[in-house]
Image (cartoon, coloured by chain):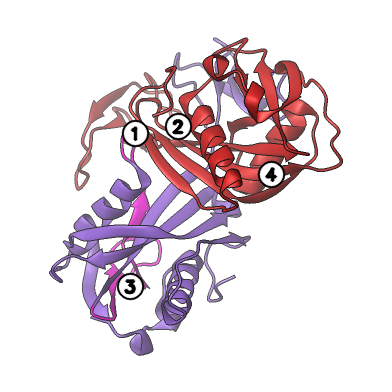
Chain colours: A purple, B red
Amino acid sequence: MKFCADCGGSVSIRTPPGDHLPRYVCDRCGTVHYENPRLIVGCVPEHEGRILLCKRAIEPRRGYWTVPAGFMENGETLQQAAARESREEALAAVEIGSLLSIVHVLPAHQVHVYFRARLAGGGFGVGPESLAVELVHPASIPWSEIAFPSTEFALRRYLEDRAAAREPYHFAELTRRFAGAAE
Amino acid sequence: MKFCADCGGSVSIRTPPGDHLPRYVCDRCGTVHYENPRLIVGCVPEHEGRILLCKRAIEPRRGYWTVPAGFMENGETLQQAAARESREEALAAVEIGSLLSIVHVLPAHQVHVYFRARLAGGGFGVGPESLAVELVHPASIPWSEIAFPSTEFALRRYLEDRAAAREPYHFAELTRRFAGAAE
């Protein structure tokens, strides 16, 4: 951030009076511009024992596999965001279920929230942000080609919990944005 | 938003190519400035059957009661944010427990996340953002003076769950920012 979104003046980084952290503060009008973590929301859609995976057509991690997920928009709930991303990326109507995982991706300033989901009807297609969309048997999940650690975390917890016939939620904390390992 | 934070040019609201929603887009450099929901994080700290409440010293809702909560900062987890707010507002060291509630405050573009918590040791004080901080018996909670609907929602679910000796999580959706009613 170099300029004030309110007045166009230059901004500098300093700690406002009464605050405890450095912020972007406008040198001209004094407006403080806060920056906060953003929410990424997705789901693990299942249909007849198989998981819906999307091959990413966009960066970051183009060509790698993920489940439907993306930035939460203003005016929607977490569940609505997860369902919207499934429509957009996989042309899929999903029924959002229980909370699966919340992963803090600290260096990216992001919180990734995943839900369990059912692929209603079983129909899907390849959305504009995907190169391919497939229903994959758990034994065939391409673990070395999963796009993000939070995706791998959600998928592994989903399958473990399904095997144990339970639906808890899981927290995790990641200090790396991209990695082969889940945690 | 009137000016581009990157180049200082004027911005206008339009839907970028390939996008599906209107965004703030810089007329000069083309940067798209996304706006996403912000996370408010707090907890319901309990000590020997009583709940830690703070009387707000700042707007909005100055003079009304709440539990420790505030904007999540970059670089911290939800649990760390909830514990930090307890330190700041109530000078209290808390042990963060299970997930209590996630409330979508749609008109405010906020997601409010609350945890169960224990007041470690029982010590507390009045932080700079509070007019008063008290350990309150559930029967004495001033329901008509609770600051935010999401606070009331968290408190009511907390007490119901405690009475039933269970710790589930709860979702809610609010279409009003301030209200006397919980839902």
Residue designated by label 4: B117
Which image quarter: residue A182?
bottom right
Residue B109 higher or lower than B171, as above or below? above
Instruction: Specify start and end residues of the magenta stretch as a single range.
Output: A48-76
For the question of whether residue B40 can be seen, the reply is no
SS state under label 1? loop
Marks 2 and 1: in contact by CB < 8 Å? yes
SS state under label 2? loop
| Mark toward the start of the polypeptide (4 vs 1) | 1
Q: Which residue is at 37% across, 89% downward?
A: A139
Marks 1 and 3: in contact by CB < 8 Å? no
SS state under label 4? strand
Residue designated by label 1: B29
Tell me the CA gap for discs 3 and 1: 29 Å
Tell me the CA gap for discs 2 and 3: 30 Å
Packing grade of label 1 (10 A; few <14, some 14-19, many >=20) is some
Tell me the CA gap for discs 4 and 3: 42 Å
Residue designated by label 3: A63
Identified by mark 1, the residue type is Cys
Q: Chain of mark 2?
A: B
